[in-house]
Image: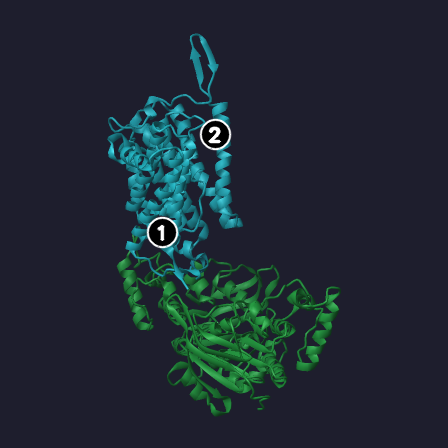
Chain colours: A green, B cyan
């Protein structure tokens, strides 16, 4: 790896402190970015990486500390200030106008010529394509673009504004492995050009693939900054988590039995009335984890919602343990023995203003032993909550604590425990470890494997390809509402699944 | 120096009480200006408001008379607000209850009181509930904003009411041999439909009894039963609640039946216990004031009773100074408005704190 220069740092942040109510998000953080380097900012969710970069980009003001950009002490009060200083940021959520073309999005706010700005924009885009290898069609409408392509537009937008300091917030979380590799090539060429790039991530493999240096954060503090050559995967993981981490899960071959979930020719409409799921058929057997891989937005969400009764089935059928469950209500489906670990746990999984105890019976409060006559038996509800708290190691002061005060990992343990306690035959898990720290992730994955070995049928939908490969007995790859194929993880490579995620059919 | 607003994670009881007291105090200071403009000594005005609302027998009983409809309306609203459904049309549901009771009272006035009065309350409850249900269905099925639909349904009924008392329901006046339609009001309802009063007061005790009992029942419904569990879950996070198998439609309808029904009972009490006939000024805004008292006192029945009694006292005291000091009614409304404004603004401080940075 080459480094273009060792001159003055582009950015130096010293002693940055940022407090949020009840949280010290950044605790005297020092950070430095050199020209011509790709600097990975590594840490678990909630470690304070994004907060630190939002401070650099002017979205938050630090409570203490100083920022120097290109040697000058600066106060960055807003993203506008940041852009003027040559700082660009690509967020996890893109800020583009859907109904405009790429060129129009760029012309808006960035083009300098008053008359026919589109010509200027197109010329600059060609320029960026040549210099960095970023391929974007200036005449394409944003809504026509894949998530990966939209991300490129965001990068071009930052370059257009004159950024020589580029911050990318978890850029690969929405990409297929191939798209991620393209992105890394673009970043390397920008590094050659002397730009400084901050790459926020929690994936160790990416650090080794693309970064020159890595700063590891844990609980708001910087644990250390290393050159990547000096680092090992184990050492970084230990810095990140604060203890040793086991990377391999022990997994015995599954012994699938009778089908529990049977889906036939299922077609489901998405929010915009277009077919999001188009004629999908599969079955999940007892003692099996059936994984669905794919880039987010290819119909996985709609498929899951149709199975658990939250979205109408247009045609086709869903059967659970042989009983027709097509278009039944969520409660009826739950009573057939389906447990659901929803994506977006804060939105669909818990009621934040209710207590942990109440949340622990959110799906069973209406029948004995929780309901006695007209009233609820709160003693029984609390006992259930206490046993969940013990069994699933949920860190919470008391069952009466409001659920909103739980961390993501504890919230997920509560949801998973609640579902498993109902003793379902089928567990539908959507991105069950999304946003969780390494410890909680490990916990949830082991639990799913154990439930498989206890003869549960498990449908696992995840945007994390490694997770799907690690856990599943069979994997379906979903692309534009269809299954591109159903494969066994031991028979294909990660790369082949990656290709299938972008729609290419692979012969098994 | 910059001020910033930070959400409080937990608020202690002491803070709440302190903020309330200070807000009332600040409101009195501000309202003093108005009285000074009229050349009155604010201390005199305030002491006479307080004295006449809470320290005389008639003041206290009159405050209770006003507390009755407020308590009924706000118990229901506290419940429906916790369900996350903003029923702004309790005034309409109150009117629906009163109108239904009027029809029954006029047509079945020959029944004995002991039979007629329970019927009147039941009919009033049913009519108020019926007027409250359509917005719940519209919201659940078509996502129609309930703030608009509940408020609009109030206006619909209000103008139907005005039409009826200026036309079909207008009383026939008799002067000597002449019969003619005179003022826009209805006949007085038959004797059997008049609610019994506590001697020497205007307190119609059956309604007071119902109001106190239902405020406790509504609270128990919300906090101790499976249906209340569903209401609170849907009010806090409808997505998670429906994902857990709860029915939005059923829950919201139930909350509106309770809320609309209690407002309807308040209407029966106003007609049969206080006014005995409809006039254009039949409505005195209890359905709207109940929104405020529900907001201020909706945590439990006891605080609802206290809040509504104090609010009732404020109304009585306002009327008193209007008469004694010959102030225009606008000044009294302004005074009440200032107090409410400060108390509600104080609620902001209960939920957030302001820090210097």
Seen in the picture, residue B197 relative to A131 is either above or below; the reply is above
Residue with the mark numbered 2? B161
Q: Residues within 10 Å of mark 2 (few under 14, many from 20)?
A: some
Seen in the picture, residue B280 relative to A232 is either above or below; the reply is above
**Residue A286 x %, y %:** 44, 74
Q: Is residue A249 at all visible to an observer of this figure?
A: no
Same-chain status of marks 2 and 1:
yes
Q: In front: A48, or A232?
A: A48
Mark nearer the viewer, 2 or 1: 2
- At horizontal 50% and vertical 48% (from top left) the residue drawn is B139
Quadrant where the image shows the N terminus of chain B: bottom left
Q: In front: A330, or A380?
A: A380
**Residue A103 x %, y %:** 69, 68
- Answer with the quarter of the image where residue A413 lies: bottom left
- Answer with the quarter of the image where residue A418 lies: bottom left
Question: Subunit of mark 1?
Answer: B
Question: Subunit of mark 2?
Answer: B
Residue with the mark numbered 1? B228
Q: Which mark is residue A453?
A: none
Report the label total: 2
Query: Which numbered disc flags the more N-terminal residue, 2 or 1?
Result: 2
**Could you tell me which secondary element the residue under label 1 belongs to?**
helix
- At horizontal 41% and vertical 40% (from top left) the residue drawn is B337
**Residue A304 x %, y %:** 51, 66
Quadrant where the image shows the C terminus of chain B: bottom left
Q: CA distance from mark 2 to mark 1?
A: 34 Å
- At horizontal 45% and vertical 80% (from top left) the residue drawn is A30
Q: Residues within 10 Å of mark 1 (few under 14, many from 20)?
A: many
Labels 2 and 1 touching (C-beta < 8 A): no
């Amino acid at each position: 790896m080459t480094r273009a220069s060792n001159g003055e740092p582009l950015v130096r942040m010293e002693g940055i402190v940022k407090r949020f109510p009840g949280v010290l998000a950044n605790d005297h953080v020092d950070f430095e970015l050199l020209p011509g380097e790709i600097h990975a900012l590594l840490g678990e969710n909630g470690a304070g990486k994004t907060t630190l970069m939002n401070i650099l980009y002017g979205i938050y003001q630090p409570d203490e500390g100083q920022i120097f950009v290109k040697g000058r002490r600066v106060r960055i009060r807003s993203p506008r200030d940041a852009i003027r200083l040559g700082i660009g940021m690509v967020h996890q959520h893109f800020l583009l106008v859907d109904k405009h073309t790429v060129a129009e999005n760029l012309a808006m706010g960035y083009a300098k010529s008053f008359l026919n700005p589109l010509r200027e924009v197109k010329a600059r885009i060609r320029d960026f394509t040549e210099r960095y290898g970023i391929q974007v069609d200036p005449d394409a409408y944003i809504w026509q673009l894949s998530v990966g392509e939209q991300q490129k537009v965001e990068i071009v937008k930052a370059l257009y504004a004159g950024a020589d300091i580029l911050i990318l917030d978890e850029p690969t979380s929405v990409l297929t492995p191939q798209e991620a590799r393209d992105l890394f090539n673009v970043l390397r060429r920008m590094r050659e050009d002397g730009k400084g790039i901050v790459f926020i991530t929690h994936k160790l493999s990416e650090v080794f693939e693309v970064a020159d240096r890595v700063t590891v954060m844990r609980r708001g503090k910087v644990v250390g900054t290393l050159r990547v050559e000096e680092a090992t995967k184990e050492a970084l993981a230990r810095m990140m988590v604060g203890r040793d981490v086991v990377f391999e899960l022990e997994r015995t071959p599954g012994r699938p039995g009778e089908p529990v979930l049977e889906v036939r020719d299922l077609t489901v409409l998405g929010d915009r009335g277009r077919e999001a799921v188009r004629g999908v058929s599969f079955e999940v057997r007892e003692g099996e984890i059936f994984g669905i891989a794919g880039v987010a937005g290819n119909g996985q969400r709609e498929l899951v919602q149709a199975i658990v009764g939250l979205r109408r089935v247009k045609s086709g059928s869903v059967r659970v343990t042989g009983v027709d469950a097509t278009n039944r209500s969520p409660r009826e489906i739950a009573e057939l023995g389906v447990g659901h670990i929803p994506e977006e746990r804060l939105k669909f999984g818990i009621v934040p203003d209710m207590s942990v105890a109440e949340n622990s019976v959110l799906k069973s409060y209406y029948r004995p032993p929780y309901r006695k006559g007209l009233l609820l038996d709160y003693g029984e509800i609390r006992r259930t909550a206490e046993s969940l708290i013990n069994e699933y190691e949920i860190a919470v002061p008391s069952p009466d604590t409001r659920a909103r005060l739980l961390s993501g990992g504890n919230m997920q343990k509560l949801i998973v425990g609640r579902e498993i306690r109902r003793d379902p035959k089928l567990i539908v898990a959507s991105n069950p470890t999304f946003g969780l720290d390494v410890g909680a992730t490990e916990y949830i994955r082991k639990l799913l494997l154990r439930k498989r070995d206890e003869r549960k049928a498990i449908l696992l939908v995840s945007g994390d390809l490694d997770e799907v490969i690690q856990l599943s007995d069979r994997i379906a790859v979903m692309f534009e509402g269809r299954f591109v194929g159903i494969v066994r993880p031991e028979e294909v490579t990660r790369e082949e699944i990656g290709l299938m995620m972008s729609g290419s059919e692979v012969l098994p | 120096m910059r001020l910033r607003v930070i959400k409080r994670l937990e608020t202690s009881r002491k803070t709440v009480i302190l903020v309330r007291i200070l807000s009332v105090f600040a409101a009195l200071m501000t309202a003093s200006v108005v009285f000074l403009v009229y050349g009155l000594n604010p201390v005199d005005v305030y002491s006479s408001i307080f004295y006449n609302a809470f320290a005389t027998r008639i003041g206290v009983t009159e405050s209770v008379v006003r507390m009755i409809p407020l308590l009924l309306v706000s118990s229901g609203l506290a419940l429906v607000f916790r369900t996350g459904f903003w029923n702004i049309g309790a005034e309409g549901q109150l009117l629906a209850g009163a109108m239904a009771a009027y029809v029954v009272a006029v047509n079945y006035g020959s029944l004995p009181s002991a039979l007629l009065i329970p019927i009147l309350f039941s009919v009033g409850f049913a009519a108020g509930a019926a007027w409250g249900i359509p917005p719940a269905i519209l919201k659940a099925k078509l996502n129609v904003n309930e703030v608009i639909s509940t408020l609009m349904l109030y206006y619909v009924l209000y103008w139907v009411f005005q039409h009826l008392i200026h036309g079909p329901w207008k009383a026939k006046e008799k002067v000597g041999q002449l019969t003619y339609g005179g003022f826009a009001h209805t006949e007085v309802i038959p004797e059997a439909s008049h609610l019994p009063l506590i001697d020497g007061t205007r307190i119609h005790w059956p309604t007071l009894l119902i109001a106190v009992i239902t405020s406790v029942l509504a609270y128990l419904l919300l906090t101790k039963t499976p249906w209340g569990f569903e209401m609170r879950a849907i009010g806090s996070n409808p997505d998670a609640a429906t994902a857990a198998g709860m029915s939005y439609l059923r829950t919201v309808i139930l909350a509106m039946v309770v809320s609309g029904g209690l407002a309807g009972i308040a209407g029966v009490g106003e007609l049969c216990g206080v006014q005995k006939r409809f006039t254009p000024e039949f409505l005195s805004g209890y359905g709207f004031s109940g929104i405020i008292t529900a907001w201020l006192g909706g945590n439990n029945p006891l605080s609802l009773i206290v809040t509504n009694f104090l609010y009732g006292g404020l109304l009585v005291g306002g009327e008193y100074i209007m008469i004694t000091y010959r102030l225009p009614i606008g000044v009294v409304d302004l005074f009440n408005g200032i107090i409410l404004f400060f108390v509600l603004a104080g609620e902001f401080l209960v939920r957030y704190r302001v820090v210097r940075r």
